Image (cartoon, rainbow, N blue to C red):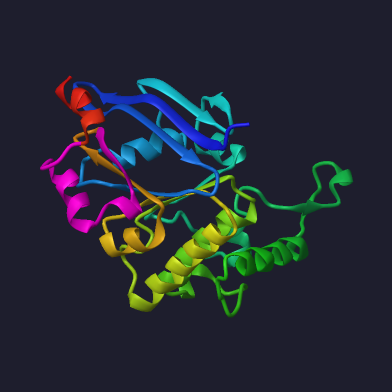
Amino acid sequence: MSDIILETRNLTKHYGGVHALQDATFTLRKGEHVAIMGDNGAGKSTFVRQITGVEQPTRGEIHFGGKQVHFAGPLDAREAGIEAVFQTLALADDLDVSDNLFLGREKTKFDWLGPFRFLDYKAMRADTIAALEKTAVKIPNIRNTIQNMSGGQRQCVAIARTATFHSKLTIMDEPTAALGVQETAQVENIIRTLKEQGEPLILISHNMRQVMDLVDRIVVFRRGRICANLRKEDTDGQDVVAYITGAKTQPEYEVAEAV
């Protein structure tokens, strides 16, 4: 049985005459943590939007869990087991932690009453506490509303939401870009916890120190194409920057660059 959890084959996205993503072939194995790096406009976010169903690819295939998939939208991807934490977080400021974790997927009780259902707050709070423990997130009061939390706590809530629903794949897009030193350390500890638990993760980051500390492999995008696939132990920061700027290209990608 294959240990590949995610595979894309020649994934391509065109916006009219703009080729934002071209022939991206990518694999992610169970338990593996992979960083996606590249300059602004390199195709990183476009790639993730295709995987998570936010946009539809122009052509190419996405295989998840050994099956070819076609996600009509983010909800389809989420139901399949892909949870994404974007920079915007998509949290409701006026709701507390449990309400945000279960937003759109609320637990109910007395379902036998037909249309007259009641939210099961007790069950949602118990599952929220379990999710926070799983990711080692420390939130003093889960009944506190999101608007009264720090940026780091908000980011941790968004990450904990992925653990609540037993995701098969977590994708994080610049999870610490707007955080301070202590909050960044907390998010990085969560990523390490997910690694220890054998959960695969894709990390989009410009932070070279963070990438070298946290992942197994680095995939570099340039001008909408994958230009390098590097094992962390075989590379360093200067080498990665050379691929990002185009000073270096791996031989297996040179033909693709010339197309």
Q: Quadrant of the N terminus?
A: top right
Q: Is residue 228 left or right of residue 32?
A: left
Q: Nearer the viewer, residue 229 or 18?
A: 229
Q: Nearer the viewer, residue 36 or 143?
A: 36
Question: What is the magenta range?
Answer: 225-249
Q: Quadrant of the C terminus?
A: top left
Q: Residue at x 20, y 23 (%)?
A: 255
Q: Residue at x 68, y 52 (%)?
A: 106
- Expressed as whole percent of the image width and height from the top left, the position of residue 73 reads 50, 33
Q: Nearer the viewer, residue 177 or 8?
A: 8
Quarter where residue 43 is shown: top left
Q: Residue furthest left?
A: 247
The relative height of residue 228 versus residue 171 in the rendered view (above or below) is above
Q: Residue at x 53, y 36 (%)?
A: 4
Task: Specify whether residue 227 is painted magenta.
Answer: yes
Q: Is residue 109 left or right of residue 61?
A: right
Q: Residue at x 32, y 37 (%)?
A: 46
The relative height of residue 203 versus residue 50 in the rendered view (above or below) is below
- Expressed as whole percent of the image width and height from the top left, the position of residue 22 reads 27, 26
- Expressed as whole percent of the image width and height from the top left, the position of residue 110 reads 86, 51
Q: Is residue 103 left or right of residue 216?
A: right
Q: How many marks?
A: 0
Q: Residue furthest right?
A: 112
Q: Nearer the viewer, residue 137 or 192?
A: 192
Task: Specify whether residue 51 is painted magenta.
Answer: no
- Expressed as whole percent of the image width and height from the top left, the position of residue 131 reads 64, 63
Q: Is residue 92 visible?
A: no
Q: Is residue 83 visible?
A: yes
